[in-house]
Amino acid sequence: MRSVENALGMEIPVNAQYIRNMIMGAHAVHDHIVHFYHLCALDWVDIVSALSADPKATAKLGQSLSDWHRNSYQEIKNTQDRLKGLVDSGQLGIYGSGYWGHPAMKLKPEVNLLAATHYLQALEYQRNINKVVSILGSKTPHIQNVGVGGVANAINLDSPDTLNMEKLYHIKTLIDEVNDFVKKVALVDVAAVGAFYADWTGYGKGVTNYLAAPDMPIDSKGTEFALPGGYIPDGDIGKFTPITSFNDPYFEDNVQESIKHSWYDGEWTRHPYKEETVPKYTDWQDDGKYSWVKAPTFLDKPAQVGPLANVLTMFAAGHKPTQKYATQVLDTVSSLAGAKVGVGALHSTIGRIAARVIRCAVLNDTLNSQWSLLVNNIASGDATTFNPPTFPKGEQQGFGYHEAPRGILSHWVVIENGKIKNYQAVVPSTWNAGPRNGKDELGPYEAALLDNPVADPEKPLEILRTIHSFDPCLACAIHMVDKKNNEIVRVKVL
C-alpha cells in the first residue's frame, strides 16, 4: 500500500493516516500482550510450581508491586484452583508443552502464581484491544478497509452505519481499559521477571546494529511522525541516525538482500528493486545453502529489528514517553535486584522481552493521542478519508515501510504501465532469522545463540528463551506457493 503510494507520489488524507495509525497501534498492543504472556512468559514461569504457592502471600506480593485492582486473594485463589483442576485431570491443555520443573526455572511459587493469574487476565485485555482493530478495519485479522490512497471508512456523525462518535467513544473506552492493564500489570511483571533473571542480561546480545522505522505519520506527505525511527550501529545510541520521511534515500538506498546461503537460484546480493525470487532447493549445506530465508543487510551489515531496536532508536531520538517507560522498567528492575541496571542491559534476551512491553506502553499512549487528533480533525469539518490513485504510463518504483510488532517491514514495488513488474517484501523475521549474508556474517538469531547456557540438551529451554525473545514468524519470512497445487503440509487434529 505505502510502496504503491510512494511510487505514485501520493498524499494521504490525515483522517486516513490517523485511522491507519490506530489500527496499527491497537494491533501491536494486542500482539505485544499476547507475546509476553502467552508466547514467551512460560519460558520463565513454572505453571506447575504455582500449585504450591500461598494465595494470600501471592496477593500480598502483587499488591506490594502495583495497585492493580485484580491482584486480589479471591482472583488469585481462583486461578490456582483452575490450574489444580487441569493438573488433576492429567491434561494440562494450553499449558501442556512446557518444561515444568526445568533446572533453569527459578521463580518462587508465589511469583509463578501471580504471573499465571495475569496470564489468564491478559486473555481478556488482548481481546479488548483487538476490538479496536475490528471496529476500524471491519474485521481482524486481515482488515478490509485499507487501500491505495487511504481507507474505506466513511465518516458521518449522523449515521449509525459509518464511523461516528458512538463508535469512536467505544474505541476510547477500550483503549483506556487496556491502558490500566499495560501500565499496572505488564510493565511491573516484565520488570519482576527481569530482576529475578538478571543473569539473562548477559545472554542473547547478538547483532547490535539496530534498525527501526519512524511510524504513525501525522501529515499527508509522511514527513512528520508520532514515533521516530532510524539506525544505531554497534549498539552505540550516540551514533543514532534518523530516518526522516517516507522518501528518505538513507533508507531506500541502503537495504539489500543476499541469497548466498538461501535456497534460491544464484549467490547474489541485490537491492530489493533488482531482486528475483527463484526457488532452488539443494538440501542442507553446512558451508553453502541452508535456509529458505534471505539475508537482509543495512549499510552492508546485518541488523537486528523489533521492539528492542524500536525502543533504542526512539530513546536515542529523545522520545519522552519511551525514555519515561524504559527508565521506569529499569528502575523497578534495579530496586528488585538490589543493583543499578542501565540501558545497556537491554542488549540481551531479557532486554528484548522488556523492550516489547515498554513499546506496548508507548503505543497505548500514542493510541490516545491519535484518537484525539482524529476526533479534533473531524470536528473541524474534515471527513475526507481517500484520495483516488492515478497510474501513469511508463515505469515507477517505490518503497513503503511500517514498524510492525516484530520490527521494520518494508515493501518494494516496480510498476510498469499500471501493472506490477517486480514486488519484494523485506519483513521483520527475514531480518532477524536470516542466515549468513554474502560476507558470511551471522544473522541476529544465529549471533544471539552464541554462548547461551544449556542445562539439559534434551530440553533446550534456554535456546527457546532467546529465539522466543524475537517473537519469530517464519510464515512472514517465507511465503511458499506450489503452482501445481500439490499438498505441502497436512495438519491432523487429535
Image (cartoon, rainbow, N blue to C red):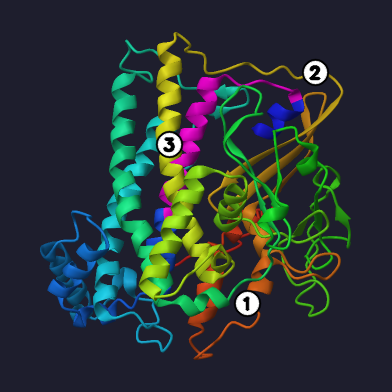
The span from disc 3 to disc 2 (Cα, nearest Å) is 36 Å
Secondary structure mostly seen in the magenta stretch: helix
Image height of 62 relative to 237, above or below: below
Q: Amino acid under label 1? A: Leu
Q: Nearer the viewer, mark 3 or mark 1?
A: 3
Residue placed most toward the observer, 25 or 123: 25
Q: Residue furthest left?
A: 74
Q: Is residue 129 left or right of residue 16?
A: left
The x, y position of residue 443, in whole percent, is 72, 67
Residue 31 part of the magenta segment: yes
What residue is shown with label 2?
Answer: 392
Range of residues picked out in magenta: 8-32
Q: Which mark is residue 367?
A: 3
Q: Residue at (62%, 50%) from the top-left corner?
A: 316
Image height of 270 relative to 329, above or below: above
Sequence order check: which comes first, mark 2 or mark 1?
2
Sequence order check: which comes first, mark 3 or mark 2?
3
Q: Secondary structure at mark 2?
A: loop
Q: For residue 440, which quarter of the picture?
A: bottom right
Q: Nearer the viewer, mark 2 or mark 1?
A: 1
- How crowded pointer 3 is (Cα within 10 Å; few <14, some 14-19, many 20+) is rated as many
